[in-house]
Amino acid sequence: MTVDAPSWAAGIAHEPGVAKPDPILSVKGLSRRFGGLLAVDVAHMEVQRGAITALIGPNGAGKTTLFNLLTGFDQPDEGSWTFGGRDLSGVAAHKVAHHGMVRTFQLTKSLALLTVMENMKLGGTGQRGERFWGALARPLWRAQEREIETRADELLERFKLSHVRDEFAGALSGGQRKLLEMARALMVQPDLVMLDEPMAGVNPALKQSLLTHVKQLRSDGMTVLFVEHDMDVVYDISDWVIVLAQGRIIAEGPPAAIGADPKVIDAYLGTHFAEGGGEALGELGPEEHREVLEAGLEGPPGGGPVDG
Amino acid sequence: MDWALILRSTGQAALGPDACYYALAAAGLNVHIGYTGLLNFGQAAFAAAGAYGLAVAVVTYGVSFWAALFIGLLASVVLALVLGFPTLRLRTDYLAIVTLAAAEILRLIVRSVRYTGTLGGTDGLQAFGDTFFRLNPFDGSSYTPLQFRADQVWLLVCAWPLVGLCCLITFLLMRSPWGRVVKAIREDEDAVRSLGKNTYWYKMQSLMVGGVFGAMAGIVFAMSKQSVNPDDYATKFTFTALAVLILGGTARVLGPVVGAVIFIGCLQGLDVIMRQAISAGYVPDWLPVDVNKVAIIRLIFVGVTLVLLMVFRPQGILGDRREVAIRDR
């Protein structure tokens, strides 16, 4: 099973920072330094509206930092970006969500001592009962609360969490928390959903259901940008892949093209050599290691045969 | 052993002004720590703001008592803004250190010689509540069976409903979407920010609400003695209120009230029991216990009790064990 390249991607060059026909997010000259380390240094990046874009790269490539910058959780040293035509640089994190850009986190942030339903309702926007004086008078917000609850119930149904609706979120399994976090983000009714490693620590059965949900987001007209290490997942669902290494975009293209790109393989290998030293790769020769990585990058999605 | 005295004395403390103002102070801390996760270790400062706002306005500036009450509450809101503006961006543990230090700084300024003319220095300020006590409809010297003085009864009749009001406000707030946001901030602030809530402002509001409760505590405290003294608002005040809160159960509307009644009642009960036991000769000579040390020894008992409580019932009296279990996961 291979993903058909989406029609918009047909005439687009496979090169870093390439312009898209209808970008929802457009980044220019973005950089972030941590002391001497240049964590993010993106000259140009565009994310196509209505597509699923994967952001991959070795550990420490700056993927999460880039997420933090774009969503206002961290401030860049330089650079600007527009979202849906509006300049969002320097906008506070909570206002970013109002503009329709919602993120999830690498380490799941389910709110443990709130019930699943309360977690969901928190995502509702423009709630009258969230204002201090309004909160004291229930009649002001009761009707709105019911509407939000109905919407939350629909989403819980879709994400198969209805049966744990009234449990504490802290009592859920790791995979269920991932589902909850995604469902909660959808309560904000965003245009762009940014998922930071949505599949990390999720068992294979649940992974399939999460994949279906992410594809469903695209069918519903949302744009998805996600960070992922699992190459099967990247192959399966993404329309476009952006590869980050040492803060820079080193390659872009549809998944099939990325898998064959020697620059990408080098980026992974190089970093692994640098990080692991002799220790981690001790048992593996460089040649074997390359094979392992290629298997990971090129392996046909859906568990097809791998070279060997 | 005079059991009637022990019971009366315990009951007097459990329903008296001490329990009342500690319930208020703990109710404020409950909003801060229990619901919002703001580790405020400077509740004494909010109490001092309320008490001194009232006392200074009446004694130094001759403002009417009722306007001065309002000034006391306003002072705590201002303190919340001043304290919160720079510190609410900090993570909880830093906030704890900063609030603790801020409360001590405030106390040392108040007791400084330089401002004695305005703030009363170490002598404090007295006799600012006459207007209030003139309205006292109760007379006679004692009220059975607990034998409160008439002016105490009048104060308690006004102050306990205040505790009820604070509990009602807490209840209304915490069942609302506002309370949901605040509780979510306690669990994980970044998640709440990512969903489009201005967490900074919610924390500020929470600091103000709990601070106003703390100011009420300070006012009741001051009224019960008809005096304010800077050293009443030392860290001991904050940590007693914190012990009360933990004993009663955090993030429970009635936790602070239950905690205060039991904590203050037991403290006084222990005091009387030990004194009685000593004078009746029940305490063997080799124990280093005498009447002068009772006040200290009862605090040792309290410490041990709190340690045992943390081990065997970490959720407090009204808390839910399940919540503690989930938090520790």
Image (spheres, rainbow, N blue to C red):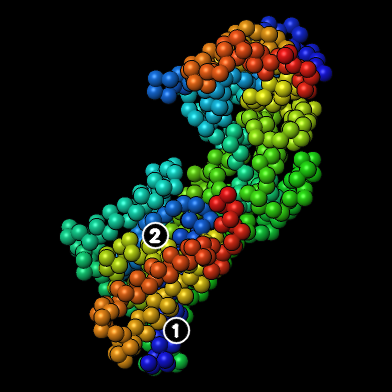
Which mark is drawn over residue B43? 2
Q: Residue at x 60, y 53 (%)?
A: B326
Measured along the vertical axis of the image, is residue A139 above or below residue A102? Answer: below
Measured along the vertical axis of the image, is residue B299 above or below residue A162? Answer: below
User: Dot 1 corresponds to which residue?
Assistant: B11
**Front in this rendered view, residue B33 or B223:** B33
Q: Residue furthest right?
A: A1
Do we see residue A85 in this rendering? no
Do we see residue A64 in this rendering? yes
SS at mark 2 in the image? helix
Q: Residue at x 74, y 16 (%)?
A: A306
For the N terminus of chain B, the image quarter is bottom left
**Front in this rendered view, residue A4 or A172:** A172
Q: Is residue B129 left or right of residue A71?
A: left
Measured from the top left, where is residue A144 in percent x and y? 71, 50
Q: Is residue A64 left or right of residue A12?
A: left
